[in-house]
Image (cartoon, rainbow, N blue to C red):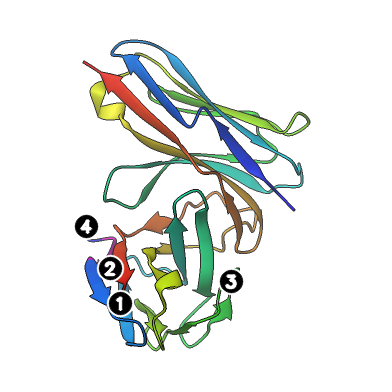
Amino acid sequence: KQEVTQIPAALSVPEGENLVLNCSFTDSAIYNLQWFRQDPGKGLTSLLLIQSSQREQTSGRLNASLDKSSGRSTLYIAASQPGDSATYLCVLIQGAQKLVFGQGTRLTINP
Amino acid sequence: NAGVTQTPKFRVLKTGQSMTLLCAQDMNHEYMYWYRQDPGMGLRLIHYSVGEGTTAKGEVPDGYNVSRLKKQNFLLGLESAAPSQTSVYFCASSYSIAGGGSNQPQHFGDGTRLSIL
């Protein structure tokens, strides 16, 4: 059974720092991996999607990497801003409708 | 740009009551999903639909029913509410099937917070 672990569960850093969020998974048989952000009281917003044949995706200050052999993905946030404060979710897509969600990292960026 | 709209946003029920959660999307998506989010559990798929008139069970379907009579709407029903169904419910939709090698993400609503007393 696929298990997705996100470490740390919570992270607080000062504004302007570069940071890395980690996601590990136990089964490398995946189609895609997605990173979402969830703001309090809101739904999930897709940030980046990496297909299984890709190694990384970039969008603005965000860069996500995927290493299936080691069962790891990272989300790199450059020059963090208070608006980046949210919970970040790593989601593995293993098949049709088979999404496995991590429990998230709660990120706080302090001004 | 409404996207995915869920109603109601909050609801408190007594054990044994029934209710229906409504999800509406204006993106002409074929695929729609209902998830529940519980502390320490992540999101879990309740039911999903691959098109108008179709529904299928997800990971945790017991105690819930769904209907997709119109392409833009996906309804989640609780037949006899139980305290274990206290949760935040999220609806999502997508253009193509999740996990089918697609690069299309799912779009989520803002959630319905449901408490069963």
Check if mark 2 and mark 1 are on a common chain: yes
Indicate which disc, 3 or 1, sits on the residue closer to the N terminus.
1
Q: Is residue B115 above or below residue B73?
A: above
- Which residue is the site of mark 1? B22
Q: In the drawing, does residue B112 fall left or right of residue B98?
A: left
The x, y position of residue A16, in whole percent, is: 31, 10
Q: Chain of mark 3?
A: B
Question: Label 4, on which residue?
Answer: B1
Residue for badge 3: B58
Where residue A109 appears, x then y in whole percent? 30, 21
The percent coordinates of residue A105 (x first, y second) are 45, 34
Point out which mark residue B6 bears: 2
Q: Residue at x 31, y 61 (%)?
A: B111
Q: Are marks 2 and 1 in contact (CB under 8 Å)?
A: yes
First in sequence: mark 4 or mark 2?
4
Query: Contact (CB < 8 A) between labels 3 and 4?
Result: no
At 55% from the left and 80% from the top, the residue drawn is B62
Where disc 3 sits, the SS reads loop
Mark 3 vs mark 4, CA separation in Å = 28 Å
The earlier-in-sequence mark between 3 and 2 is 2
Q: Nearer the viewer, residue B66 or B11?
A: B11
What is the crowding at mark 1: few (fewer than 14 residues within 10 Å), some, or many (at least 20)? some
- Same-chain status of marks 3 and 4: yes
Q: Type of residue at label 1?
A: Leu
Q: Secondary structure at mark 4?
A: loop
Q: Earlier along the polypeptide chain: callout 2 or callout 1?
A: 2
